Amino acid sequence: MTPDYLIVQKEDNIATLTLNRPDKFNALSAELLTQLSAALDDIKTDQSISVVIIAAHGRAFCAGHDLRQMRANHSEPYYQELFNQCSRMMQQIATLPQPVIARVQGLATAAGCQLVATCDLAVASDNARFAVSGVNLGLFCSTPAVALSRNVSRKRAFEMLVTGDFIDSATAVEYGLINHAVAADKLDSAVASLAEKIAGKPKSGISVGKQLFYSQLSRTLPDAYQQAADVMACNMMSEETVEHVDAFLEKRPPQFSS
């Protein structure tokens, strides 16, 4: 039986996925990737969940791919499928209707840094560190570069990729890799506060908004505005949105039938 490398908890309208390989620095083995993918598939269709938190046990958030497992399966087809599997999981996060917050309590390197960059939001303890350090082993972090270069400026991303240098949480905030850096003993409350704030918003706006946010980035300016206008027009037809707007105009709480 495969160990529980991922712990899934659902409380109220927030789901927490906790990486649970602390002795391996939560390295993304094929088994952990499979469990993450299955959990994300389940959450995607769970109407009760408004926000997802990805957390980790132990000293590291995630040290990237499991190098020992990779060396034990030394073949190009294996590596191709492993990196494709990881890429599919990362894209699941991006296409998930619910916003995803990374709760980073320690080291996040290579594909672990990619995971942070892929999440919609990230809050880290002030002693966390980040790097795409595969280049130190002769392995350029090509797939992490996709997410990293979509979060930080090109020159900063490329410098991280070709030097393998670590940055601290304050620098990660400055670069735009994470949203907030807080004291370690404030991490849980900071993540909970952000998650609850988002979970308190009308679901219809959040889900269509997340989809639009990523989709429009790859379009020309006129196409982006056209897509955004279409999405907003459709969003305004939602019963939930109509009730919230009417309640706002009539200065009353929104009312929904159970």
Image (cartoon, rainbow, N blue to C red):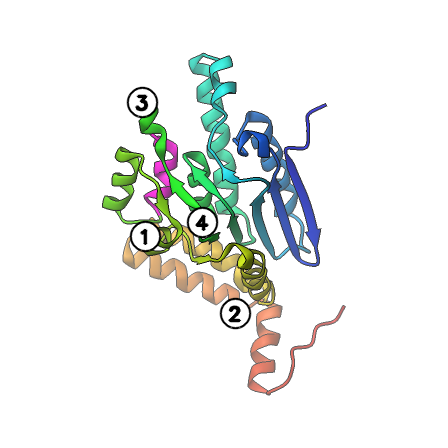
Q: Amino acid at mark 3?
A: Gly
Q: Earlier in the sequence, mark 3 or mark 1?
A: 3
Three-letter code for the amino acid on which mark 4 is drawn: Asn
Instruction: Estimate the spatial distance between the alpha carbons at disc 3 and disc 1, rounded to whole Å.
Output: 25 Å
Circle 3 Cα neighbour tier, 10 Å, few/some/many (<14 / 14–19 / ≥20): few
The answer for how far apart the CA atoms under marks 4 and 1 are is 16 Å
Q: Is residue 68 left or right of residue 147?
A: right
Would residue 121 be seen by someone viewing this image from the given angle? Answer: no
Report the residue at 59% width, 87% height from top: 250
Magenta segment range? 140-150
Give the amino acid at mark 2. Met
Dot 1 surroundings within 10 Å: few (below 14), some, or many (20 or more)?
A: some
Q: Are marks 3 and 1 in contact (CB under 8 Å)?
A: no
70 over 152 or under it: above or below: above
Q: Which residue is mark 2?
A: 236
The earlier-in-sequence mark between 3 and 2 is 3
> Chief secondary structure of the magenta span?
helix
Q: Which labelled disc corresponds to residue 175? A: 1
Q: Quadrant of residue 212?
A: bottom left
Which quadrant of the figure contains the C terminus?
A: bottom right
Asked if the residue under mark 1 is in contact with the one under mark 2, i.e. CB atoms within 8 Å, the reply is no
The residue carrying mark 3 is 138
Give x and y (percent) for residue 248. Answer: 57, 82
Residue at point 45% right, 40% down?
108
Residue 127: mark: 4
Query: How far apart in space, not on screen, are marks 2 and 1 (Cα)?
Result: 35 Å
